[in-house]
Amino acid sequence: MSIFGSILSKIFPSAHAADAAAPEATPAPVAADAPAAAAPPSAIPLGDVAAVLDAMPGAKSLNWRTSIVDLMKLLGLDSSIDERKKLAAELSYGEDTSDSAKMNIWLHRQVMTKLAANGGTVPAELRD
């Protein structure tokens, strides 16, 4: 499982279970002259990310709202620099990973943005 997938499943365990249980759909052929249909939603509404994280044990002692390290610690994930570099590669970070402060800020914003894109409700100030 990807690191982001692990983050998502730790926050919304049922999201991963639903993905695993859902059969892969084969798109039906579309006639060339048929009007374009609206794209299906890319995500299932999952819920309030901030509320879920705030309710987790240890949330009050961690600064998960601005720190990718604290977010990963809160979720019980490895927050080492090597894991964060892997997450950066997974999320297509295009900068130098040796500037860990810059990378960490970018990672946190990207994770929050991707949580929102995958159906989570994330406050605007936490997203890109």
Image: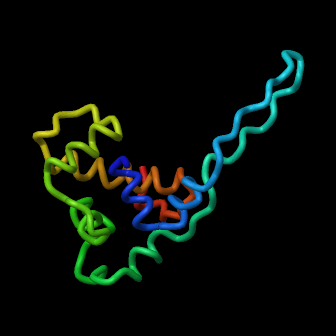
* Image quadrant assignment for residue 37: top right
In this picture the colour scheme is rainbow
* Image quadrant assignment for residue 97: top left
Farthest residue toward the left?
Answer: 98
Toward the viewer: 108 or 83? 83
Tell how many labels: 0
Toward the viewer: 20 or 128? 20
Vertical arrangement, residue 60 with respect to residue 116, above or below: below
Vertical arrangement, residue 96 with respect to residue 113, above or below: above
The residue depicted at 40 percent of the width and 74 percent of the height is 53
Vertical arrangement, residue 62 with respect to residue 35, above or below: below
- Residue 109 location (% of width, % of height): 36, 53
- Residue 100 location (% of width, % of height): 14, 47
- Residue 63 location (% of width, % of height): 26, 72
The residue depicted at 62 percent of the width and 61 percent of the height is 45
Toward the viewer: 105 or 14? 14
The residue depicted at 37 percent of the width and 51 percent of the height is 4
Position of 83 with respect to 123 (left or right) is: left
* Image quadrant assignment for residue 78: bottom left
Toward the viewer: 1 or 83? 1
Position of 40 with respect to 12 (left or right) is: right
Position of 22 with respect to 84 (left or right) is: right
The residue depicted at 89 percent of the width and 17 percent of the height is 33
